[in-house]
Image (tube, grey):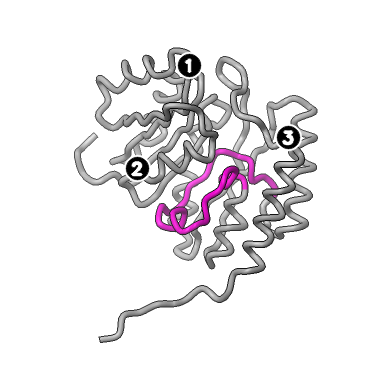
């Protein structure tokens, strides 16, 4: 890959995913060939297994692979934010580090975002979910409640596959679980949303390290907070410099 400014940055938050790092990095690289130059930013969110060692081994031969580390686990939203803030590309793609999000969809997400200059976010929507029946039920309930309250027009905000403009993301109010409310908050800032269906797949190895959205009380608090933010938003200023 050449040394030009990256066109896209792929941000991957991970915690204790040592067995998934190498195969997922290879898949991301293959998917991003038509989008070069690119950078891959792994954010190790306080892993206690061999994740850091695997990333170090891979980065030794990959100048486009960057590694950031949290001294202690701060959660998935914090890891995503760390990666986005460090990115040097104008477009950021996120995906989960467990392998359930197929990197093959990265070009489709970026293309969907490129086609619509008014869009701030291309949101993946999972089909063929490979989670347990109980988790799928939780997801349906959470998405139905969220959609009824926020009216964000998105049936699956929990999908980790997203492509968005870095400056749009950095303008959003930050809080834990931000990544699950991005469609509503991107709309709040006056930007459009485009959707791309993606086929879900089983995680490559290991077990889930981040909670799904199954802590009802915390989820309801977040929902109320986001609804308040949307209600309190006034007209987005259209600014031009006058000489």
Question: Any mark on residue 214, and which?
Answer: 3
* Circle 3 residues within 10 Å: few <14, some 14–19, many ≥20: few
Question: Any mark on residue 48, and which?
Answer: 1
Instruction: Please identify, in this view, whether the residue under mark 1 or under mark 2 is nearer the observer.
Output: 1
When asked about the image quadrant of residue 148, the answer is bottom right
Does residue 171 appear to the left or right of 132 in the view shown? left
Residue 237 lies in the magenta-colored region: no
How far across and down, in percent of the image, does residue 10 sit? 41, 38
Provide the residue span drawn in magenta: 155-180
How far across and down, in percent of the image, does residue 77 sit? 53, 40
The residue that appears at 36% across and 34% down in the rendered structure is 40
* Circle 2 residues within 10 Å: few <14, some 14–19, many ≥20: some
User: Which residue is at the front of the view, 25 or 223?
Assistant: 223
The residue that appears at 62% across and 62% down in the rendered structure is 229
- Above or below residue 23? Residue 239 is below
When asked about the image quadrant of residue 62, the answer is top left
Q: Helix, strand, or loop for circle 1?
A: loop
Question: Any mark on residue 86, and which?
Answer: 2
Check the image and name the residue furthest to the left.
Answer: 3
Check the image and name the residue furthest to the bottom.
Answer: 243
Q: What is the count of numbered marks?
A: 3
- Above or below residue 117? Residue 13 is above
Instruction: Please identify, in this view, whether the residue under mark 1 or under mark 3 is nearer the observer.
Output: 1
């Amino acid at each position: 890959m050449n040394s030009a400014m990256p066109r896209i940055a792929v941000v991957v938050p991970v915690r204790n995913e040592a067995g998934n790092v190498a195969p997922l990095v290879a898949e991301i690289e293959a998917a991003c060939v038509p989008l070069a130059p690119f950078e891959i930013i792994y954010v190790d969110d306080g892993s206690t297994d061999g994740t850091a060692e695997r990333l170090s081994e891979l980065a030794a031969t990959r100048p486009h692979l960057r590694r950031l580390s949290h001294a202690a686990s701060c959660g998935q939203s914090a890891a995503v934010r760390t990666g986005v803030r460090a990115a040097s590309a104008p477009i950021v793609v996120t995906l989960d580090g467990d392998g359930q999000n197929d990197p093959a969809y990265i070009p489709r997400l970026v293309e969907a975002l490129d086609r619509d200059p008014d869009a701030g976010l291309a949101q993946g929507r999972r089909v063929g979910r490979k989670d347990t029946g109980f988790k799928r039920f939780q997801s349906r309930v959470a998405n139905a409640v969220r959609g009824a309250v926020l009216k964000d027009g998105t049936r699956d905000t929990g999908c980790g596959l997203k492509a968005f403009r870095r400056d749009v993301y950095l303008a959003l109010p930050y809080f834990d679980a931000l990544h699950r409310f991005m469609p509503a908050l991107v709309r709040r800032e006056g930007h459009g949303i485009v959707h791309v269906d993606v086929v879900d797949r089983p995680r490559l190895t290991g077990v889930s390290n981040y909670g799904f959205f199954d802590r009802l009380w915390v989820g309801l608090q977040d929902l109320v907070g986001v609804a308040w933010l949307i209600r309190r938003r006034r007209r987005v200023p259209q600014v031009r410099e006058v000489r």
